[in-house]
Image (cartoon, rainbow, N blue to C red):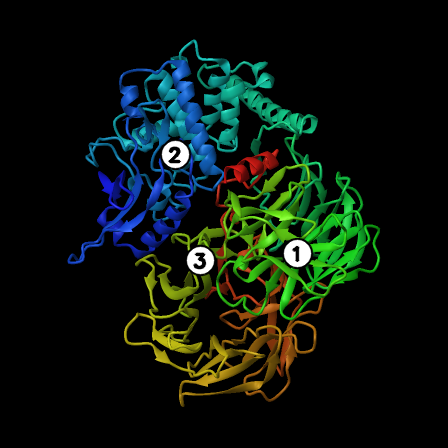
Amino acid sequence: MGEVYRALDTKLRREVAIKILPQPFANDPHRIARFQREAELLATLNHPNIAAVYGVVDASPSSSGHVTFAIVLELVEGETLAHRIVRGPIEVDEAVAIARQVADALEAAHDRGVIHRDLKPANIKITPDGRAKVLDFGLAKMADRDSSDVMISESPTITLHGTNAGTILGTAAYMSPEQARGKAVDRRTDIWAFGCVLFEMLTGSRTFAGGETVSDVVASILKTDPDWRSIPANTPPHIRRLIVRCLQKDPQKRLPHIGLARLEIDEGSTAADAVPVSTAPSGSRWKRALTVGAMLFAAGALGASAAWYVRQPALPQIVRFPIVLDSDQVLTGQGRRPIAISPDGTRIAFVAGRNLYSRSISDIEARLVATFDDTGGVTNPTFSPDGRSIAYVSATDFTLRKIATDGGTSITLCSLEALPYGVSWDALGILFEADGAIMRVSADGGKPATLIARRSSDRLRSPQMLPDQQTVLFTAVDAITNTKNVSTADFSRIVVQSLNSSEPQVLIPSAMEGRYLPTGHLAYTSRGVLFVVPFDVKSLKVTGGPVPLVEGIRSDGGTAFYEVSPTGSLAYVPGTDVTVTGDQHLALIDRTGKVDLLKLPPATFRNPRFSPDGKQVAVEIRSGNEGNVWIYELSGASALRRLTFGGSNRFPTWSADSMRVAFQSDRDGDFAIFSQRADGGGAAERLTTPEKDVAHVPESWSSNGHLLVAATKGAETTLLTYSATDRTSRPFGSVRSSRQPTNAAFSPNGSWVAYQSNETGTPAIYVQPFSATGARFLASVEKSGDDPHHPLWSRDGSELFYVAGPNRLVATSVTERSGLTFSNPVPIQIGNWRNTFGGPSTIRNYDVSLDGKHFVGVISPGATNSDPASPQVHVVLNWFEELRQRVAAR
């Protein structure tokens, strides 16, 4: 990854290490931007066994045409573990002590969503006082162009022999099988490397040598087993078992969390000691024994943890472990929170696919509680105060229901107008959001009562009743200012309001998903980080500053996926705030739901659009509050190419001949529509001039290229058409919608325009002649729970696609005779990728291919079955103890 120098920080007067990044890296703006974002995260890793990252600097000489970037690191004295192993095997006690420190470092990083991906003895230093320091944390991920396609030839580190033929790539010997195959990796690849390092310390030889070439090493990793007989005879059984668990080729069978390695090193596993692990060569008998041992170890570890917690909740031991779901159980909440934890902290409920599951943290498998067909699903699970029931929202018929924790017949409590953001259950009933207000219904059902009415543009979400049963804690989201691509926390705030008052009280700005904790704190999230602040529940005052506790909590659609039980158990879904991190993928999805990721690095993709000739995709890529339009050739003949410069540029729309792209830009101070040649030649041309406080959004070009239909968004939303012939704009018909965008689309023959409107009070898709004279046709089928939006024609005009509701794409056949007729809509299998198909007020994050067989869409990490990583829910038992320790340390 470059050259490393000892240097002096002249400002802080300390010695540091400076790693100069290679020129190809430094000259790639996308990689540098990504590197800086990742370095900000790495700089938060404050752990005694991790070499600190101080920052990234631009060291470019002012007179040089070269760009030089460097990363500033903690200077760690001592020898590397690789140099130590050269002198021979390390004694068992010393090797285990080093491994314990490395496991600590990995656990601290994994808890914050950082994966090393290049762990090996050369990246571990032993200081003169015997402390292990892990180097280069996360740099392998930052150096890689595409984390979903890691090629060995692009590995970030090599041996001192460089890239001469016949030399072994330094990373190859420690690559997990999935990494060696070029697949996406998760924290389990670090666990594999950890096993390799521990094996090498004990034996003095590499776990997988294989031969002299990279191919030999990779073949050895994929096809052979380590020489278990080389492990010293005095190695304790639990350490042997730990190495075996870490070196499982199938990541599903591998040790799921490095925290379990730490526990095994410290205490061993009594349950697993009853099953001896053979170190003989692989065979069916050995594999059966290993499988039984692994299952008993997992059951014993989780069961012992849960049982210990229930018996002695006050003990200051903090236990962490993941609940690994089946690979087909993709966590989804349709933008709502998909997990819940029981009040006693011993059971988890979660939504996977369209089903509701319940699982004791001491069990190995989850229990299916309720299942739903493809027309809906379930969101917002929450436990009853006694933990015996679960309330949830059915997205099939928009009802609030409850069901026994172990399953059975569900009971409908009340009907809903829309899917709420947040549901909670206390002694007086069930609280939920409804059209921005906070409602309560009896746990026995009935008519909901309004507790707190919606105020102006605010939407009130995630309600929780405080202990006095007279004050509600909630998140207020400003819907009017939600116009930029930033985290929902940036336009949200944590608020309390008494039921006897009409005035809310803001507690924490720029925050969301508040939870009152019995420790005297408020928990909340902002940009994927979980914070706590001291809170006096009597005076309703925040009494101290925020303390960050957990980084890397998944946030999506204004909802953070975490829950805390009153007894101190924390459950959360690891991930990112997908609205700000750029950690999303552009993908092709066929009508069966099969996903093929485009060979592009993750970014904040928006508004992908196929060119009419089917050869290119125009897409907006966001960076903070700004965006630009980029062009990608589907043939792969060239790299992703930036099209727009200056200001924030959004909503790309192709001309019919694929020669130009229209887009919205604020480069001149307003939100006008511009046009640019698709090959990047020439200057951008302004097409429209919006009035004050009005934005113009391009939506569809006519097939003859003369007309552009666009939306005007201000106090109300209307449609206009821009004529390329006389360069004038005029209103389109009488289409108006004061609450939602119109999302208009020309038919391929240019005769019709489809759009979405709620002008009658019911959302619907309409099609009318472009001339604005003649009959208007209803294209969508009115159905309870539907919210049709984002219409799109197939390229031959035979079908009209639209989003019928959360995560539901449908197609209706179009027949044109004396007018238009539409068939009943047919669902298209798009899977559970919520970011691909959002709500009516969002951008249209999909487009249809020329042949109508594929869609291009934006999906989030873990949303595709091509990702081998299993979804997980992370659990921390006795988390309140960690909270107390961290707060006291401040």
Is 813 above or below relative to 638? below
Quadrant showing the N terminus:
top left
Q: Nearer the viewer, residue 468 or 48?
A: 468
Q: Check disc 1 and report the residue beneath it.
A: 474
**382 relative to 841 in the view: left or right:** right
The reply to whether discs 3 and 2 touch (Cβ–Cβ < 8 Å) is: no
**Label 2 – label 1 distance at C-alpha:** 38 Å
Q: Quadrant of residue 296?
A: top right
Q: Which mark is residue 604?
A: 3
- Residue at point 69%, 66% (across, down): 454
Q: Secondary structure at mark 3?
A: strand
Q: Amino acid at mark 2?
A: Ile
Point out the residue furthest to the left here. 63
Labelled pair 2, 1 in contact (Cβ < 8 Å): no
Q: Hey, what amino acid is under mark 1?
A: Phe
Cα–Cα gap, marks 3 and 2: 30 Å
Locate residue 67 relative to residue 109 in the image: left or right.
Answer: left
Between 542 and 292, the one nearer to me in the picture? 542
Q: Which residue matches tag 2?
A: 50
Dot 2: what SS? Answer: loop
